[in-house]
Amino acid sequence: MSEVQGRVRVQRVAYKGEIVEVKTTINHPMENGTRKDKEGNLIPKRYITHFKCTYNNKEVFRAEWYPSISANPFLSFFVTAIESGNIDFEWREDTGKVFKKSAEIIVES
């Protein structure tokens, strides 16, 4: 499998109070531990268990995921543009690995 990497899409510039759509995806196999490879061996369990998004260090969205979520999960949600700053994303895997991504938003009056 290629390296796990998250991707995000956030409107770069917004007006104060504007509702902004946030889109995220992560290329990840989301293996539930019940599938078998070509030789008949079980593929080890490995999936994203938690997703968190913060806007200027304040949590704005959180999700808990389970093995039934499909590979390369996509997520879309909305935030209100309040002030310029960073929108940070964090995916946590059941193995303990953490994957992070960040986007900047500029808020105009």
Image (tube, grey):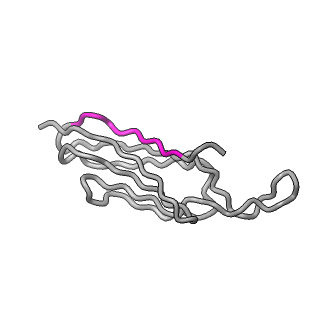
> What residue is drawn where x is 64% and y is 51%?
29
Q: Is residue 18 left or right of residue 11?
A: left
Give the magenta range.
5-14
Farthest residue in the right direction?
A: 39
Name the image quarter holding residue 9: top left
Instruction: Report the front residue among 80 and 58.
Output: 58
Q: Specify whether residue 11 is painted magenta.
A: yes
At 36% across and 42% down in the image, what residue appears?
A: 21
Where's residue 43, x and y in %?
75, 59
Residue at 56 percent across and 47 percent down: it is: 4
**Could you tell me what secondary structure mostly forms the magenta stretch?**
strand
**Which of these two is toward me, 100 or 58?**
100
Picture coordinates of residue 30, whole percent (x, y): 63, 55
Residue 31 at x, y percent in the picture: 67, 58
11 to 56, vertically: above or below: above
52 vs 56, left or right, is right
Residue pictured at 36% horizontal, 45% vertical: 102
Residue 51 lies in quadrant: bottom left
The residue at the far top in this view is 13
State the count of labels: 0
- Left or right of residue 20: residue 48: right
Q: Quadrant of the N terminus?
A: top right
Q: Nearer the viewer, residue 11 or 38?
A: 38
42 over 71 or under it: above or below: below
- Quadrant containing the C terminus in the rendered view: top left
